[in-house]
Image (cartoon, coloured by chain):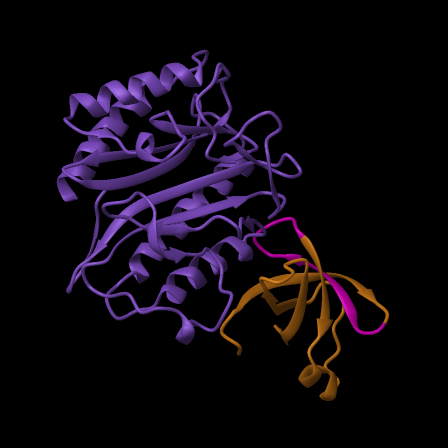
Chain colours: A orange, B purple
Amino acid sequence: MKDNVVVIEGEVVENLPNTLFRVKIMSSEKIILCYLSGKMRKNYIKILPGDKVRMEVTSYDINRGRIVYRM
Amino acid sequence: MKQGGEKLKCATTKLLAFIKDGITTEEIDKEAERLIKKEGGESSFKRVKGYHWTTCITINEQVVHTPPSKRIVKKGDVITIDIGAYYQGFHTDYATTFVVGGKTDAKIKKFLRVGEDALYKAIDKARAGNRIGDISSIIQNEIYSNGYFIMKQLTGHGVGRDLHEDPFIPGYLDRPVVKTPVLKEGLVIAIEVIYSMGTEEIKAEPGNKWSIVTSDGSLSACFEHTIAITDKTTVILT
């Protein structure tokens, strides 16, 4: 893990084309746009609405994230 | 500085009790000055060039540096008091945010709690041998993971013979932790957690030389403590 990212947990609300997802942050009402990390895509990990996921967000744009784990 | 901090703490405690529904921020400022003088200190902010007030009092969407005015404090306002004392040649700096009247909805309560927690967790990390990045990353984690925004252009700072000194303590990481400066014993810093509900962008308030507001008018808050890093522990001075 890079050290200037923030790890957040959330719940997927919508699947979009091109392995993009809208994810609601667990501890707030905010919804951010996330893509699936390359490692998860390589291993064909399927993500469906309702799944709890862990994502990484950087301070450059906190309205986007990268999904790194499905719980 | 420890004595100065204690005096500031006494004055602030009394000041917070004084604030109530219906008074103007100017009156709060006058009371603040009286209380600090009574404790034997001097206003710190008045020593900043061009600033003629003892406190910065920001309400709701105002972020920082708002001079006292005729604005009336209303019940339910989210108010931040930023205050500093100058005692025997050294400055101390402190800020807190709370709701006037005490009653509010759960959303605002949580908003304020997150900031306060972040500050205390950050102070916990401020030990000799750690880096400034450790402080920044914990503030960043706490604020972002709750869906709030950090004001990137406003940072904490060193305190001493001047109110604002090096090093800067940003509330977010702009480089890897190992590339940030190491905290040494004897260093005195003011850690500031400045964040808002809806945006990280700030703008100058129209018609005011000092005041800064959030660009979308969302709520913002600020929590600050002056701390001294000693060889064994970290002391909160204010």
Residue B145 in sight from this viewpoint: yes
* Quarter placement of the C terminus of chain A: bottom right
Q: Answer above or below: position of B81 versus A35.
A: above
Is residue B138 placed above or below B6 in the rendered structure?
A: below
Residue A45 in percent (x, y) is at 72, 81
Asked whether B76 or B215 is in front, the reply is: B215
Based on the picture, tell me whether residue A26 belongs to the magenta stretch.
yes
- Residue B106, percent across and down? 53, 36
Residue shown at 24% from the left, 41% from the top: B91
Left or right: residue B98 compared with residue B107: left
Say which residue appears at 31% left-offset and 45% top-offset. B225
User: Residue pushed farthest bottom?
Assistant: A42
Q: Is residue B62 above or below residue B197?
A: above
Q: Residue furthest front?
A: B49
Q: Is residue B225 magenta?
A: no
Position of residue B164 in the picture relative to residue B202 (left or right) = left
Nearest to the observer: residue B94 or residue A36: B94
Report how many numbered discs are placed on residues in the image.
0
User: Which residue is rendered at x = 38% and y = 36% of the image?
Assistant: B96
Name the residue: 17% across, 44% down: B1
Extreme-top residue of the structure:
B22
For residue B215, what is the image quadrant?
top right
Locate residue B125 relative to residue A52 in the image: left or right.
left
Find the magenta span and give its range.
A18-30
> Can residue A49 be seen?
no
Q: Position of residue B56 (x, y in %)?
A: 41, 30
